[in-house]
Amino acid sequence: MIRIVQRIVELPRLVRIVLVALLALMVTLALSPMVDELYFRLLFDSLAVVSVWLARVLPSLVTASIGLVMYAVGWWLVVGTVGETPAPRLVVLWYFGVGLLALVVVVFLLIRGVSLVNLINS
């Protein structure tokens, strides 16, 4: 297992940056329909009374924040600072496991044709 992590960490820096960005994007895309669904079912009416702007923007902010956290954690674990090769830790495998699970969820959602429009109308 540590060999897999070692190979990931030793990839060229640009490849690691692209991998981290793609995994963060996959997590964001996988969670977006779920966050929207929960939000529209539970919170939309109560927040719309307080602020229409907040009611429209909040699910996007939550989803984008989760993606940004995933990107930052990946940068810390996999990319590191300039000239640094991060230490091969097993948590890197967990990070890639979460990202790959998100990829499977995104592919599943694409095959099913799930979109925000489908969730709201059901």
Image (cartoon, helix red, strand yellow):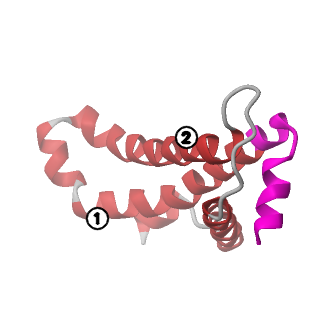
Q: Is residue 2 magenta?
A: yes
Residue 117, position as x, y percentages in the image: 50, 58
Question: Which residue is painted at 45% across and 64% down in the image?
Answer: 34
Query: Looking at this rendering, what residue extends furthest in the front direction?
Result: 87
Q: Main secondary structure of the magenta part?
A: helix
Q: Which of the two residues, 101 or 85, is positioned nearer the viewer here?
A: 85
**In the image, is 77 to the left or to the right of 15?**
left
**Residue 80: horizontal and vertical position, in percent?**
67, 36
Specify whether 99 is left or right of 85: left
Which quarter of the figure is the N terminus placed in? bottom right
In the rendering, which numbered label is found on residue 11?
Answer: none
Q: Magenta stretch: residue 19 in it? A: no
The mark lying in front, picked from 2 and 1, is 2
Q: Quadrant of residue 43?
A: bottom left
* Residue at the image point whose x is 28% and y is 64% from the top: 41
Check disc 1 and give the amino acid type: Arg
Q: Which residue is mark 1?
A: 41
- Judged from the image, the secondary structure of the residue bearing numbered disc 2 is helix
Determine the CA span between mark 2 and mark 1: 30 Å
Q: What range of the chain is rendered magenta?
A: 1-18
Q: Does residue 37 sit above or below 44 in this rendering? A: below
Q: Amino acid at mark 2?
A: Ala
- Per the image, the residue denoted by label 2 is 72
Q: Position of residue 11 (x, y in %)?
A: 86, 46
Q: Is residue 78 left or right of residue 45?
A: right
SS at mark 1?
helix
Which of the 4 image quarters holds residue 82?
top right
Image quarter where the C terminus lies is: bottom left
Of residues 118 and 99, the one nearer the viewer is: 99
Please report the residue visible at 53 percent of the width from the left and 46 percent of the height from the top.
Answer: 67
* Residue 86 appears left or right of 91: right
